[in-house]
Image (spheres, rainbow, N blue to C red):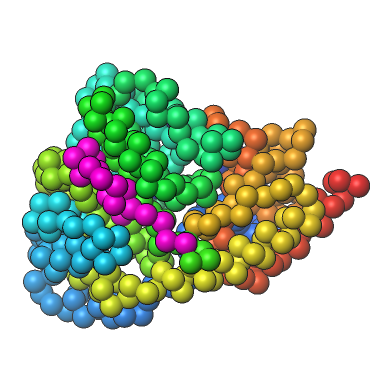
Amino acid sequence: MKFAKRLDAVPPYLFAELERKVSEAEKAGVDVISLGIGDPDLPTPPAVIDALAEAARDPRTHQYPTNHGTEEFRAAAADFYRDRFGVELDPRGELIPVLGGKEGVGHIALACLDPGDVCLAPDPGYPPYTSGPVFAGATVHYLPLREENGFLPDLDGAPDAKLLYLNYPNNPTGATAELDFFEHAIQVARERDLIVVHDNAYSEVAFDGYRPPSFLEAEGAKEVGVEIFSLSKGWNMTGWRTGLVAGNPEIVERYRQLKTNLDSGMSEAVQHAAAVALTAEREFPREVSEVYARRRDLLATGLREVGPEVNVPRATPYFWVAVPEGHTSASFTELLLEQASVLVSPGDSYGPNGAGYVRLSLTVPDSRLEEAVDRMTRALVIIQS
Ligand SMILES: *Cc1c(COP(=O)(O)O)cnc(C)c1O
């Protein structure tokens, strides 16, 4: 059989070898705790589940959804953006449901990029910022996120391009950005005719009273770009595939055209449930954030006891930790797996500039996290002595 080359053009899946080691260890009876993936362990709010069940009994939801999104969903999303961010969105043309933020990230590249175009993507960054543009035939130019710059990219030094992905609060670094950074991105985008796609998966997962801004709050954002918002992390809905693209009406319309050709949109029963999340369950992400804040403090205390300065995140369920002297991301990941039976993500799986870091996720039950911290601190104390 002969296949398309585009799948060979995306970077190899760096977890493959690790997954093999984990399953080997598990087969040998070792209890491995995974802090590797960022998939919330807690359930979706009950009111959202009830809303889905109710909507699923309505035969109208058994038919094709409209590819614009239901009026209910669009109104709920526009109201949420107004109340949460002070952003006005026209529900008739400035937003559309997407089947999760990942679908939005990938397909926006197909809607906006041609073969030969250049796309700017943060490094380290979420892997679809590479695969989406590569599938569109575009070239990805990585913008390094360096610790000394607060993990913000140097936009002035970036080459000319057609599309720029940004993502704050950031995965994997846990870094946050303020409005002045977004305003600068908009200025650069205007000067260079650049489309800005801000991936906002984590604005609702934040701690100590901090409320991360939306890109669309920045003056002129709607002229140059869109924001992709996801319900996955804030409402524990990764399995539901719910999010939206909002902002520039021309981009939203191009995106809608693409989706009309590839999928037929989000089930209207799921749209109803998502609308309930964005209205009746608005406070839910704060409860989720409180759980992560407790876990964050637990992990921070544990890590500090044995070693390096850690950047304690203000948002996102992630710790981005520099590996000890003499280690690489891979060797430190292996060491934690072998000595502590704890799995973390090697930083370079998010791009070349992730080298020298590992990512730890807080998405495991408290008792498991406590156990993981215990095992890691014991292993690290032994190594240091
Ligand atoms: C989790 C995540 C998303 C959204 O995921 P979906 O489940 O597809 O909505 C988007 N971007 C980043 C950076 C993420 O970490």
Nearest to the observer: residue 149 or residue 297? 149
Confirm whether residue 246 shows in the render. yes
Q: Residue at x 54, y 29 (%)?
A: 352
Nearest to the observer: residue 60 or residue 92? 92
For residue 226: magenta?
yes
Relative to 144, 17 lies left or right: right
Q: Residue at x 18, y 76 (%)?
A: 55
- The x, y position of residue 174, in whole percent, is 52, 50
- The x, y position of residue 253, in whole percent, is 11, 44
For residue 89: magenta?
no
- The x, y position of residue 171, in whole percent, is 48, 47
Confirm whether residue 67 shows in the render. no
Q: Residue at x 35, y 42 (%)?
A: 182
Relative to 286, 186 lies left or right: left
Residue 70 vs 98, above or below: the answer is below
Quadrant location of the N terminus in the rendered image: top left
Residue 115 vs 24, above or below: the answer is above
Residue 306 vs 295, above or below: the answer is above
Q: Which residues are magenta?
A: 210-229
